[in-house]
C-alpha cells in the first residue's frame, strides 16, 4: 500500500481536461509540497510539476498542479495522445523522514 | 548535456551483495542532493535513499535501512549504492535522480539499471 493514494487509472479523449488526484496526510502533503512525475512506457520518469504548481522549463502549459490541505491534483488541459503515460505524485514525509510516492495513475487517451 | 548514467546492476543470489554506481555529467555534481529510486517489475516508484551535497545528510527508506549504504565521491562526480543482504523483493530497476535539496523535486533522472535477486 502506498502512503499517497492515487486512482489506478484515468482516461480522456483528445482535447479533454483530465485530472488526477493524490491524497495524503498531515505529515506529507499537509506539510510539504507535492511533485508530479510522468513515466512514458519503458522510459525513466520525468518531472512535470514541482512545488505543487510549478512547471519546469520545457513542460507544456497544459500541465498544471494544485494542492489543498492533504490532497493535490494534476490537471492536463487539452490532453494529447502523447500524454498517455503513468503519473506519480510524491511528497516528503516528516514522520518517515523520507520521500513517499503515490501508487501511480495510468492515463489512457482514448 | 546534463546526464546521469547508472551501472552495476545484474543477477545476484538472495543474501548477496551488489554495488550500483551513477556517473553524473553536465552539471556541478557537488552542489546537488542525490537520490536512489527503484521500481519493481510492473510496480510503482519507491524512494530508496538520499544523500546531501556534502554527505552530511543521509536518509533511507525503512525497507532498506541497515542493508543499503548510499555514498558519493564529488571528486569523481559519482553516486553509489552498496546493497547487502539482498532479498527477492529488492528486484527492481534502480534509478539515480538529482535534486536541488533534500526536499527538492527530482529534476533529472538516469535511465536506470536492473537488479535481479534470485531466491
Image (spheres, coloured by chain):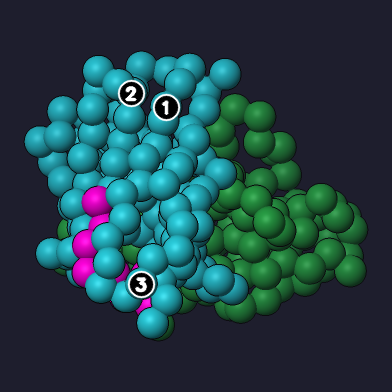
Chain colours: A green, B cyan
Q: Nearer the viewer, residue A58 or B94?
A: B94
Q: Say which element carries label 3.
A: strand
* Dot 2 crowding, Cα within 10 Å, few <14, some 14–19, many 20+: some
Asked whether A14 falls inside the magenta stretch, the response is no
Mark 1 secondary-structure assignment: strand
Residue B89: in magenta span: yes
Q: Which mark sits nearer the N-terminus, 2 or 3? A: 3
Q: CA distance from mark 1 to mark 3?
A: 29 Å
Label 3 lies in what chain? B
Residue A23 shows in the view: no
Q: Check the residue under mark 2 and report the chain it is in.
A: B
SS for dot 2 = loop
Question: Residue at label 1?
Answer: B24
* Disc 1 + disc 2, Cβ < 8 Å: yes
Q: Are marks 2 and 3 in contact (CB under 8 Å)?
A: no
Q: Position of residue A44 (x, y in %)?
A: 59, 49
Residue identifier under label 3: B13
Amino acid at each position: 500500500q502506498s502512503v499517497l493514494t492515487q486512482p489506478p487509472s484515468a482516461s480522456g479523449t483528445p482535447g479533454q481536461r483530465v485530472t488526477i488526484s493524490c491524497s495524503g496526510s498531515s505529515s506529507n502533503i499537509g506539510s510539504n509540497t507535492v511533485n508530479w512525475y510522468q513515466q512514458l512506457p519503458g522510459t525513466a520518469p520525468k518531472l512535470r510539476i514541482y512545488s505543487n504548481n510549478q512547471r519546469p522549463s520545457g513542460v507544456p502549459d497544459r500541465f498544471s498542479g494544485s494542492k489543498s490541505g492533504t490532497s493535490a491534483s494534476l490537471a492536463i488541459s487539452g490532453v494529447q495522445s502523447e500524454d498517455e503515460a503513468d503519473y506519480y505524485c510524491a511528497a516528503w514525509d516528516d514522520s518517515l523522514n523520507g520521500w513517499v510516492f503515490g501508487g501511480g495513475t495510468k492515463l489512457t487517451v482514448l | 548535456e546534463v546526464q546521469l548514467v547508472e551501472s552495476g546492476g545484474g543477477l545476484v543470489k538472495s543474501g548477496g551483495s551488489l554495488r550500483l554506481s551513477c556517473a553524473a555529467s553536465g552539471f556541478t555534481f557537488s552542489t546537488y542532493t542525490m537520490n536512489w529510486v527503484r521500481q519493481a517489475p510492473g510496480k510503482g516508484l519507491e524512494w530508496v535513499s538520499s544523500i546531501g551535497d556534502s554527505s552530511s545528510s543521509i536518509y533511507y527508506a525503512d525497507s532498506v535501512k541497515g542493508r543499503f549504504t548510499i555514498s558519493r565521491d564529488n571528486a569523481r562526480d559519482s553516486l553509489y549504492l552498496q546493497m547487502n543482504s539482498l532479498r527477492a523483493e529488492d528486484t527492481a530497476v534502480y534509478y539515480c535522480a538529482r535534486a536541488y535539496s533534500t526536499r527538492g523535486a527530482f529534476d533529472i533522472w538516469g535511465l536506470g539499471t536492473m537488479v535481479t535477486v534470485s531466491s
